Image (cartoon, rainbow, N blue to C red):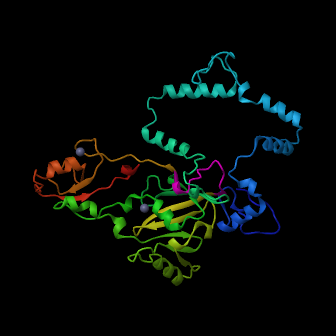
Amino acid sequence: MAASGGSTTSNTNIPEYEYSDVNTKPFHIGGFRSEWLSRLTPDDYSYQPEEEDTFDANFAKEHGVSAETMAELKSVCSIDSLRCHPEDEQPDPEVVPPNPTLQTLIERKKKQDYKASRKITKNRHDLYANELERLTYGMKPEAVDDILPEGEVILTVNVYYPASYDKFNYVRPHMTLLMTGSHSLAEFRDAICCVSDLQVCGEFSNTPNIAPDFISKDHYKSAFFYFEGVFYNDMRYPECQDISMTTIEWAKSHNFPSYSQAKMEDTRFMDLNVKVGFPYLYCHQGDCEHLVIITDVRLTHKNDCLDKELYPLLTHKHRVATQKCSVCHIFIGRWFTTNDEFAPSHPCLFCDKCFRTLHYNEDGYKLGDFLAYPYVDRGAFN
Ligand SMILES: [Zn+2]
Ligand SMILES: [Zn+2]
């Protein structure tokens, strides 16, 4: 994003840095889009590929070279002339020729040697994540109606681990999503995956089969985002409460600048005033607080994933190690028990299979004394 650099007529919708390389001053996303659209011609942001001849002519004009020079450049730089094997030989792209002098080949050789020296190979999660990003590159929808409109805005948003999770919380984003300007904040909320939404509260040693029906997400639906002095509350369901009220009233009674409220479901990204690079807040399940940072706002490009249906588009997800069952050490923990005479430790983590085998007879009757709490592992949703 370019800062408007010393312009005398200050237009608040052209992002300028507030702190160099950290964050911008606040600007309106819809206004920013209009600024771009008023300066570009529709050809500039059209998805239609430019004719080769037109592209060449424009390129030559922009660089001030003649048509002959352009033709020569094209033949010299053509990939057909890039070769490190005899012309009549079919090359193996995996084989780097001995003693390469070309820098790209030297780098490639280094990378190949490094890869060969590593004991661990990429696991299937990483392969899949990479593949996902590649697969969506330039992807067109099947139905014409599902194409992202030309000139739409795309935002890159990082969502961090909750503040209570001290391991990674401020260091790296838990997930990175691409959102469009037309998405509402409620759609953004639904795209955020946090384990505290899936937590099951309560003790279920007498009724382990009904535990999965008590997911926090279904019980505590209130949540808010905070951007630039406004709390955007989720009010989609009758049980939703305005949980920002406590903070607003507290701020009022302590002479802080006043805050306002709006509804998450009625607010699109396009309507927001934000600073790019600045940490904002997402709060749900009472006190599960995540930092949210918008790192980029831009117009769509023909190489973007153009299928509207695939947005919000997840482009990065950080993985965490899973906690294994303390009996079999194979499966992910699903239960933890306390006051448990069968357990090697207190509390003790079990997978579903070991938990049931140890604590219930074949008719499902509870054996012995213990308390059992469902456990949802963060890593189970990698
Ligand atoms: Zn959370
Ligand atoms: Zn187990």
Residue 252 position, x and y percent, is: 53, 83
Res 199 → quadrant: bottom left
Is residue 303 a member of the stretch shown in magenta?
yes
Q: Is residue 376 above or below residue 264?
A: above
At a point 36% along the width and 50% down the height, the residue shown is 380
The stretch drawn in magenta includes residue 307: yes
Q: In this view of the protein, which residue sits in the foreground, 380 or 303? A: 303
Pinpoint residue 185: horizontal percent, then vertical percent: 52, 67
Question: Which residue lies at the image location 65% right of the left edge and 25% below the top edge?
Answer: 105
Image location of residue 39, percent across then percent down? 78, 61
Magenta stretch in the rendered image: 297-314
Q: Residue at x 83, y 67 (%)?
A: 8
Residue at the image position 47 percent from the left and 76 percent from the top: 244
Closest to the observer, 71 or 14: 71
| Quadrant assignment for ligand 2 | top left
State which quadrant residue 327 falls in: top left
Query: Which residue is nearer to you in this view: 251 or 203?
Result: 203
**In this view of the protein, can residue 28 be seen by the observer?**
no
Q: Is residue 381 visible?
A: yes
Total marks shown come to 0
- Across and down, in percent, residue 137 comes to 58, 45
- In the image, is 165 to the left or to the right of 116? left
Image quarter where the N terminus lies is: bottom right
